[in-house]
Image (cartoon, rainbow, N blue to C red):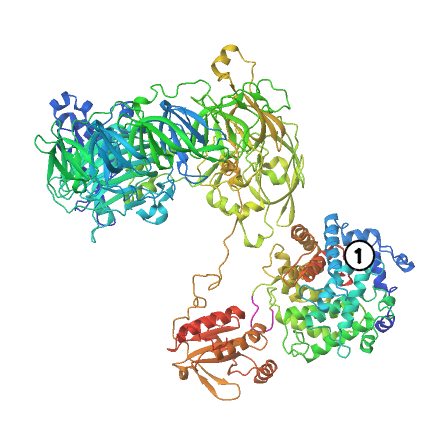
């Protein structure tokens, strides 16, 4: 089944897209298949709560406008960290907005971004960019775009003439599959069964591994074959760094004993997305987060929020609703005039991650499926 | 038993015995003794006196009082009945029997001593640098500056708060104390001046003699030029280096003084030294001669309690207090007979081991006051004479038999309250009051010691000689040989109006002619010269105004009735340095029945007396830019001036009723004079009722308290996300936004709520976890329960809150009041000290000179804001647009109160616009106070609800981090100890033994390949050590629990060549308390741990460099080219 979907590269009629469109009622791009599989209204209300408040919509719109304005011609973002990961996060923010990626106001920026990620991919290894962080976030963006973005016009004809450029003009599906293969190869070589900055690393940390693992899980959800054994091995790494209290270490062995809501959220999220909520570690991390809804991270606030929102949403919808109220309140104050939420990695990273933390109010991305 | 003498009479001191009544031991193994001295003129007792004796006896306050009362009863028995019959009490030594009499004693401003009005108030706090203060006879004062005026016996004074100056008749003025700016040269009189010329009445001019004839003496005085003094008023000429040398004139700079216990204990303020600190001491850096004349001016707030010690020694063995105890002293004592009148007595005393002498000087009211004394100290004879400023003797003490070395120090010791040293002048004294000369002869004393007596005829300018006319041949004395010239038959000055003293030490009696201007300052001409005439000099003297130090209007010239009881001038304007009775007035042509909307000063020409220029008529519309629409007319002035837009002041119509003393406290409250420190003080404190809890009285009526201090009686109808909707009888406005609100009272509490300090602190402390999500409201239920959270809304039935992200619903009927927490309050962690208990109460006792500075007030631009405060506690802030006078009152009443002059009428109401309530009209008869400008914020922060502010919980400090004062890496317990010995195998073979490296500095770098920061830092540490000279540092990278293969491949990947020791079991890491890596340990040449640094990065490298360079003694250890 997966193979059949892999072959249909222009998968705008896929089941996943249909479901997404069903969630997003205001969208214009209705197809017959969509209408054929409507989500019953009462269930919709119960599962997804109320409409997105206006202030959240305005905040997200302003943030996205900032991203559109600051995107380079090449499709990347400068002025801070840059690479496929940064581009990927910005793409995710746009995809999560609910605007039609093929016709809406973000369709061109999305396509530019996708071309940028794919162009950066190593054609032989599938490695995206300068570290496995970039690889993870880039892969996630490819996975979420896969099937949602109409690829027929992704690579306009006549653009570029060099052979290598032509060689890198692969489809989103091809790029995603290649990226998955790279991540699995890296994991295979890693004695800990997880990832670190370098694809050849023999050590691992919770943070890099989170980026890659979530990307892999998204790819699997999108229909790319990802062996269960690989996922189990990665999950085993996470269980090994999760304490019974729910705290999660940065890396195996020494270091990283302090509380990090970001790490705990990553662990909780990967347990959930990997359908392993039954694990005691999953329960412990979920409980830990639930009990510290008011906690304030001292560093990497945007990064923490990005994972915390997803982890809470996946494990405890009620807790997420409470936490989200506070988030909206805080972000209203934090947003700059130009719509950005800059952090230490630059305007693009901070804004994208913040918008993605807010994106749970929309829940358009497949990775948010509960 | 010690012998004491008490002066009951200036002429005949009466010896009497001291009855020791009590004492108690102090920790210093001394005895603090309270003793009482009884004599015909009164009973004094000091609460405390230290000496070393061996009687164990415990003092209690009651016993002191008991014995004191017994002593009072005992006087008639042991006292000399015959002396008593002669009425010695009445002629007693300048002990003022009647408070009214005290006005005539000494300096005319001693009137303050018995007055009830606080004369001090805000003298200290300045807005625009040093400020001069004008004191009126009725106790009012006005900070500002002198302005030019051509009128005789009138001072034109520009108040700081006003845009126009006022004319004050001299008869209404008590004194002027001029600010001394720092740049005025303090070493005056100038060195070029040779002589001091003492005139009749104590006047003194510094100058050089340029001419002398039978009836005139001509002097050259710096700043004045040639001055012709009438010879019959010249008392003596004294060479400055001779008998009358000025040693110190000040206080001008704090550097002239040693402040104890710290330099901050005293502060400079307009040329004065001020302290509010109990126990603060000042020591002059000058040396007192054995014979000295000290003229001192002191003032205080509330109650005077100081010690002035003269001639204290600086022994090595003595403590300061001991030295002070042995010096001649002025002290403030409680006097049993005066205590009922709330008066203390200033006494002079001298104590030694064997004897003591004490003399009562003057009574001092337990209120703000001021004193000006002349002290003649003769340590060779052991006498201190105290005189009033006018030269009237007040008392004297004698050291008697015991001869001691003269001390050189002068100390001033504040024992409570706020004390200000306004002026001090120390000069040499020749030990004589005045040398008697024969009837018509002049004595010339030579520097060599000999004297010439005769009739001084003239001064020969050509030869520089004084020429005496003898019968046969005239005698000549060279002026440069003269130490002093003493004239005979000095005439007394007739009664004069002014006594002026100058910054160069000159002083002068005279009449004021005029003050002229010399340069323009903004719209006004600044005062330039101060013209005076005196019978003693032949021509008017034009003193530079900048040289003025103080000006005193002599009592004879002051109006006997004071400023006069003008009806209707009962309200009081108070601002920094100013307290001025008067009234808000309206120009007669404008204010009455002015049609709404028309500005009362709308550019019309009116003939209104103001003081600018000399013309009486000026366009009223042409007010200064910073003039507000409020005009103030001081009592006794015919003109009014607009208040400045930027003024921060208050106008008091009715003083709040005095707060009722708490009955429980009253019992135990010690008098300030009598509460000794140490054991006794601690005991008293322990016995006193320390109220640890706050009574929680809430006004029953619904109120809204705004952050501006506005207090609006209203009924809150609902609260939504925007703000509060309410109904008030005061206005049609129904809404106020959240950011303006501080508290709302919804309903009466069911019972008195008692809130302990601990609970209040807990309620107002923000946990670290909630730092980014602080609660915004605190609600209190009618039963006294508190709930902190975020108020979401309220309607008629329920109140919705979010408490720790959970939604909570509370029945509205249960809520007594709501307090708003604002984010900007959180930034300011200082909590105001007021209690919620005062909410809803109208008694406000705030002071303008509180320590709270108005933060916003100063920067708020725009028109003057006014807050009207009613007795009921209702407050409303508005921007006044005009003031109006009501002419619909009876003619009789108008005669008395309304019509102030032909040009001004009393304002009866203010009209303006409130930012919250819109247009408003405030009837002045209904209000207690008007707060102007910054005073609104000043008072607002003191209001009860404003004190409810959240504050951050204390931040945890990480050991060894963040403390800049400490050397980094020295916090570990291992530092300074011998480094734990170990032996480890090296990667690639061999063993590392720490003991083999003694004599070298060893750096241990604990690391692992999976540790990113370790891998980043390691090459930098290696580079640093390579840069250090020689081969004195050994770097060993101790790997934690990894396989050799892993280590080798990691090092290869990073291109590192390191000496790596293997710690496979983590044993060495444990010995070196490794809990996080990278950890770097520096071991010095002796084998002791010098530093233990945790963490990596640039910071570590710099800290390590510093540590290593310190150990190696390298200053600039960087190799050439670096």
Q: Residue furthest right?
A: A32
Q: Using a 10 Å C-alpha cutoff, classify the residue at mark 1 as few (fewer than 14 neighbours), some (14 to 19) or many (20 or more).
A: many
Q: In terms of image quadrants, where is residue A240? A: bottom right
Name the image quarter holding the N terminus of chain A.
bottom right
Q: What is the total number of numbered labels drawn onto the structure image?
A: 1
Residue A41 x, y percent position in the rendering: 83, 51
Q: In terms of image quadrants, where is residue A105? A: bottom right
Of residues B769 and A177, the one nearer the viewer is A177
- Secondary element under disc 1, as helix, strand or loop, is loop
Of residues A37 and B984, the one nearer the viewer is B984
Name the image quarter holding the C terminus of chain A.
bottom right
Left or right: residue A330 versus residue B406 is right
Q: Residue furthest front?
A: B462
- The answer to whether residue A214 is visible is no
- When the figure is inspected, residue A337 is found, relative to residue B141, above or below; the finding is below
Q: Residue at x 60, y 38 (%)?
A: B740
Left or right: residue A148 versus residue B165 is right
Residue B474 x, y percent position in the rendering: 11, 34
Tag 1 residue: A98
Residue B513 x, y percent position in the rendering: 36, 26
Label 1 marks which chain's residue? A
Q: Is residue B768 magenta?
A: no
- The answer to whether residue B79 is visible is yes
**Magenta span:** A250-257
Left or right: residue A272 versus residue B708 is right
Magenta span dominant secondary structure = loop
Q: Residue furthest left?
A: B472
Q: In terms of image quadrants, where is residue A102? A: bottom right
Left or right: residue A164 versus residue B816 is right
Residue B288 x, y percent position in the rendering: 22, 44
């Amino acid at each position: 089944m997966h193979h059949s979907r892999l072959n249909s590269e222009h998968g705008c009629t896929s089941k996943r897209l249909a479901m997404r469109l069903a969630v997003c009622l205001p969208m214009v791009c209705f197809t017959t298949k969509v209408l054929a599989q409507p989500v019953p209204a009462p269930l919709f209300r119960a599962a997804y709560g109320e409409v997105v408040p206006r202030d959240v919509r305005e905040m997200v719109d302003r943030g996205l406008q900032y991203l559109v304005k600051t995107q380079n011609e090449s499709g990347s973002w400068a002025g801070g960290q840059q690479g496929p990961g940064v581009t990927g996060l910005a793409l995710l923010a746009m995809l999560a907005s609910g605007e039609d990626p093929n016709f809406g106001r973000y369709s061109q920026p999305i396509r530019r971004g996708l071309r940028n990620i794919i162009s950066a991919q190593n054609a032989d290894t599938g490695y995206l960019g300068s570290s496995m962080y970039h690889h993870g976030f880039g892969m996630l963006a490819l996975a979420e775009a896969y099937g949602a973005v109409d690829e027929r016009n992704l690579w306009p004809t006549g653009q570029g003439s060099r052979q290598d450029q032509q060689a890198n003009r692969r489809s989103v599906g091809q790029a995603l599959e290649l990226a998955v293969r790279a991540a699995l190869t890296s994991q295979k070589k890693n004695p800990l069964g997880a990832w670190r900055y370098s694809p050849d690393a023999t050590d691992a940390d919770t943070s890099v591994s989170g980026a890659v693992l979530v990307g892999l899980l998204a790819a699997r959800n999108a229909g790319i074959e990802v062996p269960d054994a690989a996922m189990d091995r990665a999950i085993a790494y996470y269980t090994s760094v999760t304490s019974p209290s729910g705290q999660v270490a940065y890396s195996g062995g020494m270091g990283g004993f302090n509380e990090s809501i970001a790490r705990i959220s990553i662990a909780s999220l990967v347990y959930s997305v990997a359908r392993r909520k039954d694990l005691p570690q999953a329960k412990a991390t979920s409980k830990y987060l639930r009990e510290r809804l008011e906690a304030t991270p001292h560093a990497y606030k945007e990064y923490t929020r990005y994972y915390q929102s997803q982890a809470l949403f996946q494990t405890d919808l009620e807790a997420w609703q409470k936490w989200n109220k506070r988030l909206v309140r805080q972000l209203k104050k934090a947003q700059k005039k130009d719509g950005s939420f800059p952090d230490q990695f630059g305007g693009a990273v901070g804004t994208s991650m913040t918008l993605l933390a807010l994106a749970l109010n929309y829940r358009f991305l497949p990775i948010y499926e509960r | 038993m010690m012998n004491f003498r008490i002066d009951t009479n200036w002429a005949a001191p009466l010896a009497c015995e001291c009855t020791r009544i009590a004492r108690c031991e102090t920790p210093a193994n001394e005895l603090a003794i309270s003793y009482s001295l009884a004599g015909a003129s009164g009973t004094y007792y000091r609460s405390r006196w230290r000496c070393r004796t061996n009687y164990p006896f415990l003092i209690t306050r009651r016993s002191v009082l008991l014995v004191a009362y017994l002593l009072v009863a005992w006087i008639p028995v042991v006292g000399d009945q015959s002396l008593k019959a002669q009425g010695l009490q009445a002629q007693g030594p300048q002990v003022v029997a009647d408070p009214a009499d005290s006005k005539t004693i000494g300096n005319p401003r001693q009137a303050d001593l018995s007055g009830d009005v606080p004369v001090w108030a805000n003298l200290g706090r300045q807005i625009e640098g040093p400020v001069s203060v004008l004191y009126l006879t009725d106790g009012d004062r006005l900070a500002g500056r002198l302005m030019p005026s051509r009128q005789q016996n009138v001072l034109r004074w520009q108040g700081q708060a006003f845009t126009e100056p006022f004319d004050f008749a001299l008869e209404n003025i008590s004194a002027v104390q001029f600010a001394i700016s720092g740049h005025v040269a303090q070493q005056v009189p100038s060195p070029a001046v040779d002589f001091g010329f003492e005139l009749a009445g104590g006047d003194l001019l510094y100058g050089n003699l340029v001419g002398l004839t039978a009836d005139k003496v001509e002097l050259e005085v710096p700043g004045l030029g040639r001055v012709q003094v009438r010879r019959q008023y010249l008392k003596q000429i004294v060479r400055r280096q001779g008998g009358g040398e000025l040693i110190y004139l000040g206080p001008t700079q704090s550097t002239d003084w040693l402040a104890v216990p710290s330099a901050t204990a005293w502060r400079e303020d307009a040329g004065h030294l001020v302290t509010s600190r109990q126990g603060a001491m000042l020591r002059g850096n000058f040396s007192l001669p054995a014979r000295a004349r000290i003229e001192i001016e002191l003032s205080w707030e509330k109650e005077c309690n100081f010690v002035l010690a003269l001639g204290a020694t600086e022994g090595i063995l003595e403590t300061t207090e001991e030295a002070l105890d042995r010096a001649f002293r002025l002290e403030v004592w409680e006097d049993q007979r005066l205590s009922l009148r709330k008066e203390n007595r200033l006494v002079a005393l001298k104590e030694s081991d064997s004897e003591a002498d004490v003399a009562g000087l003057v009574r001092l009211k337990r209120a703000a006051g001021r004193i000006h004394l002349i002290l003649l100290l003769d340590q060779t004879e052991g006498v201190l004479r105290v005189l009033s400023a006018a030269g009237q003797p007040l008392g004297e003490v004698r050291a008697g038999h015991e001869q001691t070395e003269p001390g050189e120090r002068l100390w001033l010791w504040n024992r409570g309250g706020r004390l200000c040293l306004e002026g001090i002048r120390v000069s040499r004294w020749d030990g004589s009051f005045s040398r008697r000369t024969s009837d018509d002869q002049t004595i010339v004393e030579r520097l060599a010691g000999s004297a010439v007596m005769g009739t001084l005829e003239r001064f020969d300018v050509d030869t520089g000689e004084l020429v005496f006319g003898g019968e046969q041949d005239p005698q000549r004395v060279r002026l440069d040989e003269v130490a002093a010239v003493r004239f005979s038959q000095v005439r007394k000055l007739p009664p004069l109006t002014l006594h002026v003293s100058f910054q160069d030490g000159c002083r002068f009696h005279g009449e004021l002619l005029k003050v002229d201007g010399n340069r323009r300052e903004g719209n006004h001409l600044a005062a330039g010269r101060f013209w005076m005439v005196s019978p003693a000099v032949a021509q008017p003297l034009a003193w530079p105004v900048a040289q003025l130090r103080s000006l005193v209007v002599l009592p004879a010239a002051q109006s006997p009735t004071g400023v006069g009881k003008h009806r209707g001038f009962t309200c009081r304007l108070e601002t920094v340095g100013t307290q001025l009775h008067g009234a808000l007035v309206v120009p007669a042509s404008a204010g009455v029945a002015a049609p709404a909307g028309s500005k009362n000063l709308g550019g019309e020409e009116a003939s209104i007396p103001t003081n600018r220029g000399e013309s009486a008529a000026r366009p009223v519309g042409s007010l200064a830019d910073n003039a507000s629409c409020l005009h103030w007319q001081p009592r006794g002035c015919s003109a009014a001036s607009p208040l400045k837009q930027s003024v921060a002041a208050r106008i008091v119509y009715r003083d709040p009723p005095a707060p009722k003393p708490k009955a429980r406290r009253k019992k135990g409250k010690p008098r300030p004079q009598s509460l000794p420190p140490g054991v006794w003080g601690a005991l008293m404190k322990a016995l006193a009722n320390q109220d640890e809890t706050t009574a929680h009285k809430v006004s029953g009526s619904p109120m809204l308290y705004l952050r501006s201090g506005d207090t609006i009686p209203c009924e809150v109808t609902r609260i939504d996300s925007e703000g509060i909707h309410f109904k008030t009888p005061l206005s049609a406005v129904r809404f106020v936004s959240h950011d303006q609100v501080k508290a709302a009272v919804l309903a009466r509490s069911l019972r008195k709520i008692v809130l302990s300090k601990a609970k209040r602190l807990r309620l107002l402390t923000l946990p670290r976890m909630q730092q980014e999500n602080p609660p915004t409201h605190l609600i209190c239920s009618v039963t006294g329960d508190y709930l902190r959270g975020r108020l979401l809304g309220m309607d008629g039935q329920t109140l919705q809150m979010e408490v720790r992200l959970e939604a909570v619903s509370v029945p509205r009927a249960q809520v007594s009041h709501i307090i708003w927490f604002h984010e900007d309050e959180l930034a300011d962690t200082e909590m105001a000290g007021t209690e919620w208990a005062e909410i809803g109460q109208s008694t406000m006792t705030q002071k303008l000179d509180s320590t709270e500075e108005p933060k916003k007030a100063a920067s708020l631009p725009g028109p003057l804001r006014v807050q009207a405060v009613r007795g009921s506690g209702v407050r409303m802030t508005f921007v006044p647009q005009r003031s109006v006078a009501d002419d619909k009152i009876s003619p009789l009443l108008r005669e008395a109160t309304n019509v102030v002059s032909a040009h001004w009428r009393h304002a009866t109401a203010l009209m303006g616009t409130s930012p919250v309530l819109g247009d408003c009209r405030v009837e002045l008869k209904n209000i207690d106070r008007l707060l102007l400008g910054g005073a609104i914020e000043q008072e607002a922060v003191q209001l009860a609800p404003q004190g409810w502010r959240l504050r951050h919980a204390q931040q945890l400090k990480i050991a060894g981090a963040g403390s800049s004062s400490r050397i980094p890496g020295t916090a570990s317990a291992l530092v300074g100890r011998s480094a734990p010995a170990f032996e480890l195998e090296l990667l690639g073979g061999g063993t590392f033994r720490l003991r083999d490296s003694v004599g070298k500095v060893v750096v241990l770098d604990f690391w692992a390949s999976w540790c990113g920061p370790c891998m980043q830092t390691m090459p930098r540490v290696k580079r640093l050590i390579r840069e250090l000279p020689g081969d004195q540092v050994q770097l060993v990278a101790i790997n934690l629990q990894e396989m050799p293969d892993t280590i080798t491949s990691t090092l290869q990947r990073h291109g590192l060549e390191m000496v790596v020791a293997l710690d496979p079991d983590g044993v060495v890491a444990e010995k070196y308390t490794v809990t996080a890596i990278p950890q770097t340990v520096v071991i010095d040449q002796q084998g002791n741990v010098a530093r233990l640094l945790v963490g990596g990065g640039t910071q570590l490298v710099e800290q390590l460099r510093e540590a290593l360079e310190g150990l190696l003694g390298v200053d600039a250890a960087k190799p050439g080219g670096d």
